[in-house]
Amino acid sequence: MNLHEYQAKQLFTQFGIPVPASSVAETLDEMRLGATSVGLPMMLKAQVHAGGRGKAGGVRRCASDAELERAARELLGKPLVTAQTTPEGLPVSRLLLEAPVEVEREFYLALLVDRAAERILIMASAAGGMDIEQVAASDPEALLVSRIEPVFGLRPWQSRQIGLHFGLEPDQQRAFAKLLGSLYQLFTECDASLVEINPLVLTSDGELIALDAKIELDDNALYRHPQLAALHDPSQEDAREVAARAEGLSYISLDGDIGCMVNGAGLAMATMDLIALHGGAPANFLDVGGGATAERVARAFQLVLSDDKVAAVLVNIFGGIVRCDLIAEGILAAVKEVGVTVPVVVRLEGTNAELGLQRLAQSDLAIETAATLTDAANKVVAAAAATRAGLEAELQAEVAADRAAHAQASVGEQS
């Protein structure tokens, strides 16, 4: 689960990590009230779950009330499109008003989980700021990487090593050691998967301040942190993913046009890989779970087809816990209930698979069955291509009809 910057900084404050003075506003009236406490000039920051806000116009320096009012009206309630969002962007429902800081130097600091090494990883760079991605790509040596041994925890030498890498003075190194220790405490106590400060700045007064903050929490551990779970903002997520979570389904939107409905995360990944191998592009990851029922299949169909991009659907079910003939009944009921208008390819394997496929084949619905996963992938890729071709032909026919009507109208006007 992602936190907004203002939420992350509230956690930073709780753990003794220095941040600029600030205020949060959800309305223009709250913005005006917050401006009196923060003072001008100030930084106005759109709150969305995406990086690259500065380059997208989501972070603005306002030197007057007029500038602040104009910027707030342009951002609040509008979508913000950055390099890390979809073309539709993310809605801005809150603004962070923050006192500016006189920056002498910028650094990058992050703690994350190294799953391969099964360790918490510290990443630090003396070159922080908006272009850290380019720095990491062009000069990997500029990133200092240090792993924390779980038995010993964060060691003093690691703080000194990073402080020297940053080129900090002795007093500044002691302040940094305290900051890094607090960051590690926050990471472990809150069950985070990522805590990032970019930039961590050294001010003209020699103080270290977290100018930005990004925190990702482990969803699997949120049951231990109800106060953190309450910070969840569903407006920053795909509406289908939110609906799927409420139904107990694992769903992730993707950019393709082949809807996938599979039981089991591993099988779902393999299905998506095979679709890509045969020239298609998955529209989603969807795991209906090992105990798939007719009702869950119907809800899953509704979820997949709520994506307008979907040109064909592949259902790939392994009947281990559940019988494939019952799943087939659920598929037939779902197709009728939902009113599926795109091609559907079904592959069943496991308990009563032959009986399930027989029931699908005997139905009067436009459902194509497949004997193997490769066969299913080939058929659904071909079906999606046919759907796209049909839509393109319809579009061209509409354009041609409009042109003909326009030409006829022009002739009528001339006569």
Image (spheres, rainbow, N blue to C red):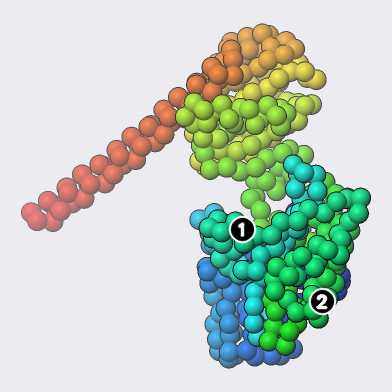
- Any part of residue 343 in sight: no
* Left or right of residue 104: residue 19: right
Where residue 296 sits, quadrant-wise, is top right
Task: Give the numbered dot on residue 141.
Answer: 1
Name which of mark 2 and mark 1 comes first in the sequence.
Answer: 1
Label 2 Cα crowd, 10 Å radius (few <14 / some 14-19 / many 20+)? some
Identify whether 55 is placed above or below 372: below
Q: Secondary structure at mark 1?
A: helix
Q: Nearer the viewer, residue 151 or 258?
A: 151
Give residue 64's position: percent from left, percent from top. 58, 91
Residue at the spot 60% in from the left edge and 38% down from the top edge: 284
How far apart in space, not on screen, are marks 2 and 1 (Cα)?
A: 25 Å
Q: Nearer the viewer, residue 184 or 247?
A: 184
Q: Nearer the viewer, residue 252 or 194?
A: 194
- Any part of residue 270 in sight: yes
Task: Give the numbered dot on residue 157.
Answer: none
Label 1 Cα crowd, 10 Å radius (few <14 / some 14-19 / many 20+)? few
Depth check, mark 2 against mark 1: the one in front is: 1
Residue at the spot 72% in from the left edge and 10% down from the top edge: 352
Task: Give the numbered dot on residue 175.
Answer: 2
The amino acid beneath tag 2 is: Ala
Give residue 333's position: percent from left, percent from top. 66, 24
Q: Nearer the viewer, residue 209 or 89?
A: 209
* Left or right of residue 350: residue 301: left
Q: Secondary structure at mark 2?
A: helix
Residue at the spot 61% in from the left edge and 27% down from the top edge: 271
The amino acid beneath tag 1 is: Glu
Where residue 52 sits, quadrant-wise, is bottom right
Give residue 329's position: percent from left, percent from top. 69, 19
Give residue 148's position: percent from left, percent from top. 82, 54
